[in-house]
Amino acid sequence: MTVRPILAGLSTMPLSKKGAREAVEIPQKRKRSFALLIVLTQERSMRDEAPFQQENGMRLLLATAVAVPLMCSAPTTVAAQSFLENFARRAADRVATAATERVTSAAESVISGEDGSANEGPEAAAPRRAASPSPAAVPSGPTPWPLNPADATYTGDLEFAPADEARVRGLHEFSRVRCMDCEGGYSFDSWITHHTDMDGEGVGGLVVGQSLSWTGIEASGRLEIVSESPVGPFACKPARMVMTGGEQTYAAPRLYCFGKSHQFAREMWVEVL
């Protein structure tokens, strides 16, 4: 005796009203249980499989879409229907929240990546050093050359290096002599105006290569124009003075320029060093 004939015979037996109603309700209950089981399974899958949240969320939405029509078509209570509707709504909200978090996280990663790219490389890691301004180059020319030719308005404004000024003081000290009828009791053989008939105007009139010689009380002197060049706004002539006393000599640079020595002076050649 096989099972199939028995089932076939049972299927042809007439059912009572109660039996027919039970036969209809049993499949419907099974469908509802099966739909609920699918929803619960999909929710657990979302919790356990975090890396696949988005895919599980889509499955959960599909399962909810299947469960809700079955729930509505089956004869069930209002409480069960409300439970499933709330469950489906929470599932949909959970999927939307997860998607929003993924988009926000991706945007933050892009922004942080752009900010970090500017700091990549050893040059960015090293502290930046402010470029130190290079010292202003002092214009130079024939010796002696003033330190501030561009800032001078009058020849008296020209300033010189301490070494050049010390050299000229040494020249005068070398040629200092005692005198009875001079102010202070001392005179200097290096003073051209004391031993020649030329002043600064006359020396400035000499051309390059020309020289002037004189004999003082104890030393003799010689001055030669070595060059001619503009210094700032002034025409100038560097010179070299040599004093000889006995077997000793002392040399120092000199400079003569054409211009006003001060505001109320007239333009002329003057000794500036």
Image: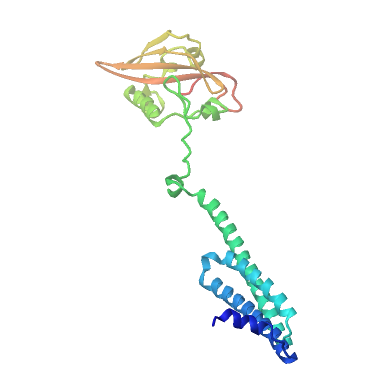
What colour-coding does the image apply? rainbow
Q: Is residue 205 visible?
A: yes
Residue lying farthest to the front in this orientation: 1
Side of 214 where 95 appears, left or right: right
Depth order, front residue of 50/128 = 50
Residue at 43% across / 19% down in the picture?
Answer: 142
Side of 187 where 46 appears, left or right? right
Judged left or right of residue 70, residue 4 is left
In the rendered view, tell whether residue 129 sits above or below residue 193: below
Quadrant in the picture for residue 41: bottom right
Question: Can you give x and y, in whole percent of width and height, for residue 193 in the image?
Answer: 45, 17
> Taking 161 as reference, is 255 above or below it?
above
Q: Nearer the viewer, residue 74 or 163?
A: 74
Does residue 180 appear in this view? no
Quarter of the C terminus within the rendering:
top left
Question: How many numbered callouts?
Answer: 0
User: The N terminus appears in which quarter of the rendering?
Assistant: bottom right
Residue 58, placed above or below residue 187: below
Residue in the picture at 60% in, 75% down:
38
Residue 29 percent location from the top left of the image: 66, 84
Query: How far across and down, in percent of the image, does residue 3 sit?
Result: 56, 81
Along the line of sight, the residue nearer the viewer: 15 or 110 = 15
Locate residue 25, reporting x and y percent: 70, 85
Q: Nearer the viewer, residue 136 or 80?
A: 80
The residue lying at 61 percent from left, 60 percent from top is: 103
